[in-house]
Image (cartoon, rainbow, N blue to C red):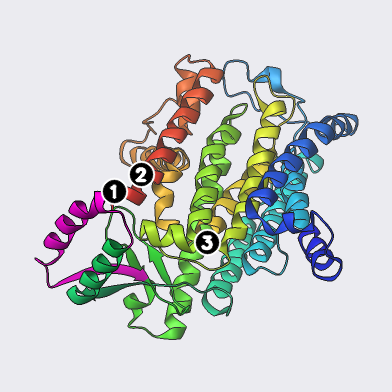
Amino acid sequence: MLYHLFDYLSANFDLPGTGLMRYLSFRSIMAVVSALLIVIFFGKSIIRALQRHQIGESIRDLGLQGQLEKKGTPTMGGVIILLAIIIPVLLFARLDNIYTILMLVGTVWCGVLGFLDDYIKVFRHNKDGLKGKFKIVGQVGLGIIVGTVMCFSEDVVIREQVPYTQPKAVEQECVEVAAAQVPDSVQLQIEEVESVETIATSTEIIRLSKESVKTTKTTIPFVKDNEFDYSWLVGGDKTLSWVLYVLIAIFIITAVSNGANLTDGLDGLLTGVSIPIVGVLAILAYVSGHIIYADYLNIMYIPNSGELVVVGAAMLGALIGFLWYNSFPAQIFMGDTGSLSIGGIIAIFALCLRKELLLPLLCGVFLVEAVSVMMQVGYYKYTKRKYGEGRRILKMSPLHHHYQKKGIFETKIMIRFTIISFILAALTIVTLKIR
């Protein structure tokens, strides 16, 4: 909103300072700051309002240390996170950008889905919340929207890396021109370079294509030629490619949002784990949307994806600000309104950047938490069917509750999981150079 206003003022009135909004770095900083201020200044008022209306968490006695003390803590705090993301994005992002629109739609969609779940739990006093099949329907619907936009929108394009063979004659000419423009003191170094260049007949380099293309390509981590086209799996058929990509989008959105939901079980846990994840996605958005950095790092250049940095910055500010109230002892819980939204936003973010195959590494904590639940439930059902008595692999699932049962205090679990998330985030960034 402000971007378009300042752009109009700059174009028509040439007012001093109106050009600031053209800088992605400035708008991203403003998004972080405004998100933080929204959470810190309005968070307390929202907490009081939730307390007045007795919108508190109902706690089941699972035998966990300090668990019953949290009964009555205000929940549905994800509303604070959503406001702190949506408002800065509306203010500082380009609203005519397809990625901004997609992220806003995804944020609101997941927020409504999580809100319905919390509403049923709190006001209908149904501890199970929204039925699983309705959650799946919501996630499938969002996956169809994201997959369809990514496949058919003319604004969703990439520029591919193409090999270019530079002949020796060109290199020789470049060396001679360079030699003519430098002092005699460095002529010897140029002569040495020239003698080396004459050994090779040609040099193959990688350059970005000048033409943007529609494609279903994605990035494969740890591989030098790291682009894979999903359409190859269906023989290049356009309709089948769309169906396949929609199924992939559904799977990723469902897996990540549910993984985030399962991780939200201790004070500050999901918030702390998500901060490095969002930070890495913002970095990847910046380099993927910057033609020079994309060329230098030999990664896929995605025109206009730089606007996702503003979204990532707003989300980063919202999470850091929410941690102010959500850290132990939590003054408010985010509920499914927050956890499903965080997971959904991360999933859509990665799909827009075509980095979804990095998510098992980047969101490793979500993955382990989800796998721990599946293993626990699967093993219990298997042993009950085979031996007549259900057995467990862990003391309790998800994994963070297993460590609670072992007597580790929840603050230590939260900090250790957050440290692991930072390590995984660093490894994700390293994959850019490992290739």
- Residue located beneath label 1 in the image: 434
Amino acid at pointer 2: Val
In terms of secondary structure, where does tag 3 sit?
A: loop
Quick check: is 188 in the magenta stretch?
yes
Q: Position of residue 192 (x, y in %)?
A: 15, 55
Q: Is residue 62 above or below residue 293?
A: above
> Quadrant of the rendered structure where residue 100 is?
bottom right
Q: Are marks 1 and 2 in contact (CB under 8 Å)?
A: yes
Q: Are marks 1 and 3 in contact (CB under 8 Å)?
A: no
Using the image as rendered, state which of residue 54 and residue 244 is in the foreground. 244
Amino acid at pointer 1: Ile
- Residue located beneath label 2 in the image: 430
Q: Position of residue 377 (x, y in %)?
A: 43, 40
Q: Position of residue 31 (x, y in %)?
A: 71, 47
- Residue located beneath label 3 in the image: 289
Amino acid at pointer 3: Gly
Q: Is residue 225 visible?
A: no
Give me the C-alpha separation between circle 2 and circle 3: 19 Å
